[in-house]
């Protein structure tokens, strides 16, 4: 597999991953809506006659589910958001791997170990540092990413407070997002609109990197 094919596969895998998350979200929300629509009929039918203990226990599950649907919807948005950010970081790691192969195609144990350590350090860095690394080491500029960088950085810092602070805005978040309208201690809620924005920005990242990477690979072959 040549490098153009490799980067194309990276991009295709990322697109498939993003679509899978979107399909999962849509399917889950449709199931929730179907349940909420049918619940009154289920309850009426249940109450039309006497039920044994097992049937009553089963109905309690449905009653509890009906009460918790709203919180489940919020949780599914959060789950999909975390998943999308994780898949984006894996995609960026793949891009880094491809660029190292571009500048050093000799496969040795020493090179493989260097690449492993570099990717590990890269994977633990902030999004802003990742973009700086790609620019400084591979001369890659991403105008579209730069234009939307504040919003993109906000996505990654939101992921961090969800994972490490139960979704509550902390001082680190406010330091990173200086123009944020949130105040310390605010719960950062992931809703449908925010998730749509997330998908749009992550696709923008992928398209920008795809264009610049393929351009660099083509230029290096001349």
Image: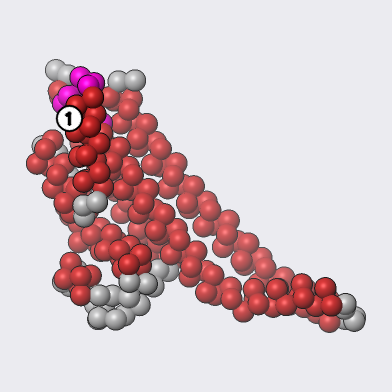
**Rendered image quadrant of residue 170:** bottom left
Task: Give percent across and percent down for residue 149.
Answer: 20, 57
Please tell me whether residue 9 is drawn above or below residue 135 in the rendered image: above
Q: Which residues are magenta?
A: 98-108
**Left or right for 48, reference 57:** right
Colour scheme used in the picture?
A: secondary structure
- Look at the image and say whether residue 102 sits in the magenta stretch: yes
User: Which of the pair 164/133 is nearer the observer?
Assistant: 164
Instruction: Give the quarter of the figure containing the N terminus.
Output: top left
Secondary structure of residue under mark 1 = helix
Percent of width and height locating residue 120: 25, 44
Q: Is residue 133 magenta?
A: no
Nearer to me, 183 or 164: 164
Residue at mark 1: 216
Instruction: Specify the farthest residue to the right.
Output: 49
46 over 176 or under it: above or below: below
Position of 83 with respect to 210 (left or right) is right
Q: Is residue 1 visible?
A: yes
At 73% across and 77% down in the image, what residue appears?
A: 60
């Amino acid at each position: 597999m040549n490098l153009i094919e490799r980067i194309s596969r990276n991009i295709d895998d990322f697109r498939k991953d993003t679509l899978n998350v979107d399909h999962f979200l849509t399917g889950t929300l449709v199931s929730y809506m179907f349940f909420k629509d049918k619940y009154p009929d289920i309850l009426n039918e249940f109450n039309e006659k006497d039920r044994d203990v097992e049937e009553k226990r089963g109905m309690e599950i449905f009653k509890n589910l009906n009460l918790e649907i709203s919180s489940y919807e919020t949780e599914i948005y959060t789950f999909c958001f975390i998943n999308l950010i994780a898949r984006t970081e894996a995609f960026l790691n793949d891009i880094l791997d491809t660029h190292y192969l571009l500048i050093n195609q000799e496969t040795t144990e020493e090179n493989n170990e260097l690449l492993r350590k570099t990717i590990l350090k890269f994977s633990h860095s902030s999004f802003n540092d990742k973009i700086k690394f790609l620019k400084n080491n591979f001369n890659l500029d991403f105008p579209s990413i730069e234009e939307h960088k504040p919003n993109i950085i906000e996505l990654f810092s939101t992921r961090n407070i969800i994972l490490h602070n139960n979704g509550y805005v902390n001082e680190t978040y406010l330091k990173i997002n200086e123009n944020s309208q949130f105040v310390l201690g605010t719960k950062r809620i992931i809703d449908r609109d925010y998730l749509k924005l997330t998908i749009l920005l992550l696709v923008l990242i992928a398209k920008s990197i795809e264009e610049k990477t393929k351009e660099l690979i083509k230029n290096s072959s001349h």
